[in-house]
Amino acid sequence: MSRTLRVTFGLLAVVVVVLAMAPKPVAQISPDVPEVTSWSGPGTLVVDLLDDDSRADDADLLAIEQTLGADLDWASEYSRDEGLIVGQVADLSAAIAALRGDPRVENVEPEVLMSASGDAGSAEAGLAAGFPNDPLYDKQWHLRAMGAPDGWKSTPRGRGVVVAVIDTGVTKVDDLDGTKILEGASFVPGARTSADDNGHGTHCAGTIAQTTNNGKGVAGVAPEATILPVKVLSGAGFGSSAWIASGIDWAADNGADVISMSLGGGYSAVIHTAVKRAREKGVIVVAAAGNSGREGVSYPGALKEAIGVSATGPDGSLAPYSSWGKGVDVSAPGGDKTKPGGGVWQDTIDGKGGHAVAEFQGTSMATPHVAGAAAVLLSTGMDADAVERTLLDSSDGTGTWDPKFGWGKLNLHTALGTVIDKFGFLRFGLAAVMALMLTNAATIRPQFRAVAASTAGFVGGGLFFLDWLPLPQNAVFELLSRPFLLWPAVMLDSRWVNFPLWVSALLPAMVAFTFGAFKPLRPLALGFVVGVGAHLVHGAATGTLNPWWFPGTMEVAWLVGNGVLCLILGLALVGAEKLETEAK
């Protein structure tokens, strides 16, 4: 067998081994879906029409009204897309029975009321020095406890990631002045905009993306993330399951990458269906465990499709109000105001037409810490499944599930370390080894091999160790620390990392046929194409690359196919070098 053939088989074996190393997802331990019970008497009914390729219209609404003999309406102006109908009926039990076998109906249930689970405190002032320069950052023990400073260090800090805050709304208070906040939508009857009339939603949005290092107020976990306000709770902090399900559907259809829900209540099949749909679209769903102070996690946090979050206080113990049990996946700082300064501090409306940095506590406050951490990880180029897996794997725990803390306490420092050290080191090493294997197919000068291998390592893994050196924060060091395929996350936003033509052999082919034609540049061209190929294969195995438009299995086929094409380009460059060397 020729040396070239042996190397080819060797490279294919490396590809197979890397794909076989794909990490398994961490189990999310959730309670069984409650049994449907019977209801009687009058009440509000929620009907979820079966989704299909056609848009629900008034004819569907009229048909349901005629079946029930009741006046119904769309849950909101946006609800035709998802077919959500609500209305008062004289007998809930009879109405549910009448629609159970209807082929148009996916779910039918009484309205479930949910509430924001947090409480407001008072605003105080203080002064702190250093980075960030937000003067009240010294009060934010909770950001330091979950490793937020590591999220600010050199990652894109959530840039390009849209986090939907499904809550009481969001108002752009003074310390959200530099945060990108989209227009949003309201699903609360009578509330025409997504502005906050409670304070709860704005406080949660601040934890996720408070404008940071702006010399005022406080800081947030992912300050470059974009907030999408979705108002589903009234000014009193309560909301209907129909409003919430509509908000989830709308957020998933309007660009949300993460959904943060600091609310909870009883089980709702309509909300469960909406959460499933969002998760199927690649949206990470994070929800509060509840504030009962006892075993029993509220919904939707208890759903297996959501990351359920319990709350810890300043000392790291479970907060006394936090719910716990099946459904908790991770814990995060939620505050404990029985301890001085022990709440979670963010800027929010003050109820008097102004704003103030206020101290809240609750699993409501723990939830946006996790949502913000997810945004930071997504902005590094990882996909939703990889982010969810990393958040749970990297949490501070014992390696086994615990009913109070889930898989452990949120630790963004460890999560980023996993991504940077593990993925960076593996990609660097994989690319360098592949380049050395390719150049071993011919008698090539050692300098060529060294340049090709080091270039491949840099392109495939980046100088990942720069993240942990005391270097100034600037775009140059940020680019150098990232593999080449993740550069769009720094220069544009994280979405462009997964543009199909970017995560393909197109650019390597252009480099191979242009720079590869010049002998002095050939080792650099070889290193580039092999580095990109190694990253594509690694991305397929780990789920850290997620090209647009392709369903799950096709994503892997696209990445692996293009990765192999890159290696074939590398073989062609080695062949060209060998021919020139032998000709001399």
Image: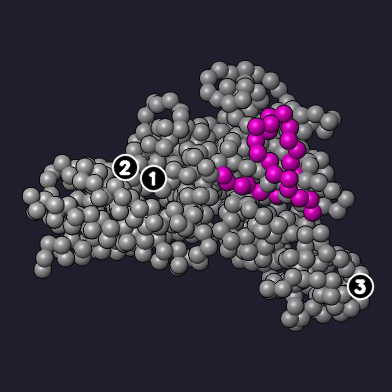
In reply to whether residue 181 is colored magenta, the answer given is: yes
Q: Nearer the viewer, mark 2 or mark 3?
A: 2
Residue at coordinates 83% horizontally, 45% vertically from top-left?
236
- Which tag, 2 or 3, sits closer to the chain's start? 3
> Callout 3: helix, strand or loop?
loop
How far apart are the two marked residues, 2 and 3, measured between alpha carbons? 67 Å
| Residue 80 against residue 322 in the figure, above or below | below
C-beta proximity under 8 Å, tags 2 and 3:
no
Identify the residue position indicated by label 1 in the image.
484
Indicate the quadrant containing the N terminus: top left, top right, bottom left or bottom right.
bottom left
Q: Position of residue 375 (x, y in %)?
A: 55, 45
The magenta-colored residue range is 160-187
In reply to whether residue 162 is colored magenta, the answer given is: yes
> Callout 2: helix, strand or loop?
helix
How far apart are the two marked residues, 3 and 1, measured between alpha carbons? 60 Å
Q: Is residue 16 left or right of residue 286?
A: left
Q: Position of residue 311 (x, y in %)?
A: 60, 43
Seen from the viewer's position, the closer of residues 349 and 287 is 349
Seen from the viewer's position, the closer of residues 410 and 542 is 542
Residue at coordinates 20% horizontally, 46% vertically from top-left?
519
